[in-house]
Amino acid sequence: MRYTWAGGARRWLLACLVCLMLPALAAETPSPLTPLQPLIDATPSGATLHLAPGNYAGPATISRPLTIEGGGQATIIGDGRSTVLSVSGRHVTLRGLRLAGSGESHDRIDAGILLEGDEHRVENNEIEDTLFGVHLKQVNASRIVGNRVTGKNLPPGLRGDAIRLWYSRDNVIVGNRFRRARDLTLTNSPDNRISDNQFSDGRYGMQIIFSPRLRVENNRISGTSTGIVVLYSPNLILRGNYIAHALSGGGGGIVFKESNDALVENNEVLHCSVGLKVDAPPQAEGTLVVRNNRFAHNIIGAFFYGEDGGHRFIDNRFEKNLTAVAISAAGTARANVWRGNFWDEYQGFDRDGNGIGDTPYEAYLFADRIWMETPMATFFRNSPAFELLDFLERLAPFSLPYRVFQDAQPRMR
C-alpha cells in the first residue's frame, strides 16, 4: 500500500511539473512565420488587410491600392537577402507594422520598405535591422510620417541610408526618428518638405544633392560626422533645425556648395568643427541670407572659401567659438554683408543704450592665420607659443593685418 501511494504521488508531482513547464517550453519555441504574400493577394483592391498579432514571412510585394494595418503587433521578417516589403502603383498605406531582416547588398539597395509610384502613406511603423530604411524611388506626393528606423549594427560607412529619396518630389517626411544609419539622402528630388525628424549616430545627418526648393525645418541632428550638406540645390529653406556634435568628416554643422538663393534662419549649431561652411560664388547674385541663427561652442563659427561672395548675415549670434570667422585666403568673402550680429568678443560700448555697439566690430588676421594656411599647425592653435605670437603681432604688427569683415552695427545683447 505504501509503494502504490508513493508511486501515485510521484506520478502526480511529475504531472504538475510538466504543466508548470509547458508555458516556458512554448515560449522558447519560435512561432511559425505566416506567409504574407497570399494574404496580400487575397485582399481586394482598395480594401484594408488587418494583420493579427504575430510574425509574417517576407519578402512581399504590393502593386495595387491597398492598406495594411499591423496595430503595432504584426512583424514582417525578411529573408536576409533582399528588400522586406516592396510597393508600387498608387495609394498604398502601410501603418503600424514592424519590419526587420533585409539583405546587406548596396547594389540592390536592400531596404525595409521600397516605394515606387505616387500618393503612398507610410505611417507609424518600426523598421529595424535593415540596410536601408525607407527607399523612395521615383515617388511623388507621398507621406512618410511617425516611423522609427534603426539600421544594421555595422560601421557607418557600410550602413545604408535611413531614408533615401531618388527622383522623388512633393513628398512630406515628418516626425520620424532615425538612428544608426549612414545618411538621410535626397538626390534629384525637388519640392519636398522634411520637418520635425530626429537623426543620431550616422555619417551625414542630411545630404541634399541636386534637389532645389526643399523646406528643411525643425529637425534635430546630433552625433553625426557632418550635419546638413547642400550640394547644387538652390532655393532651399533651412529653418529651426538643431545640429550638434558634428566634429569629423571634414564638413561641419551646415555646409553649402554652389547652392544659391537659400534662407538659413533660426537654426542652432553647437559643438561642431565648423558651424557654417559656405563657398563664395564669383558673382554677388544668388547668395544666401543667414539670419537669427546661433553658432556656439564650435571650433570655427563660419568658414568661407572661393571668391568675393555677397552673402548676407543679419542678427546672428556667435558665442564661445574658438574662431568666430575664418577664410581660405585673403580676399575671400569680402563682399559679404554683416549687420546686427552678436559677437561675444566685441569690446565696444553702448553709450546711447540702443542695444547697438557705438563702434563697428572688425575681425583681422594676425598670427592665427598660420593654422589656416598650414593645416598641420592646427593642433598647436591654442598653445602658449601661438598665443604669445598672436599677442605680439597684435601689439606691434610687422605688417598691416588683413581685415576679414566688418559688422557696422554689432548687437550688445
Image (cartoon, grey):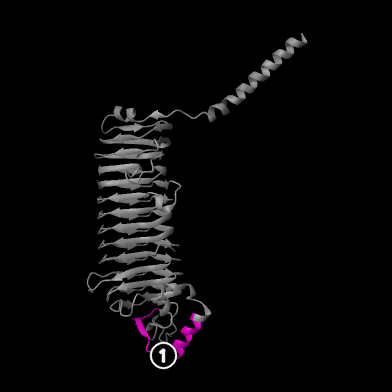
Label 1 secondary element: loop
* Residue 403 lies within the magenta run: yes
Left or right position of 204 against 309? right
* Residue 205 lies within the magenta run: no
Residue 69, image x, y percentages: 36, 36
Residue density around tag 1, few if under 14, some if 14–19, many if 20 or more, within 10 Å? few
**Residue wearing tag 1:** 398
Identify the image quadrant of the C terminus: bottom left
Quarter of the image where one finds residue 4: top right
Does residue 205 appear in this view?
yes
Segment tinted magenta in the rendering: 386-413
Q: Residue at x 44, y 48 (%)?
A: 154
Q: Residue at x 42, y 60 (%)?
A: 225
Identify residue type, mark 1: Phe
Q: In the image shown, does 42 or 129 lie closer to the viewer?
A: 129
Q: How many marks?
A: 1
Q: Please determine whether, in this image, residue 340 is positioned above or below residue 180.
A: below
Q: In the image shown, does 405 or 241 lie closer to the viewer?
A: 405
Residue 369, image x, y percentages: 40, 79
Identify the image quadrant of the N terminus: top right
Q: Please determine whether, in this image, residue 313 is positioned above or below residue 357.
A: above
Does residue 412 appear in this view?
no
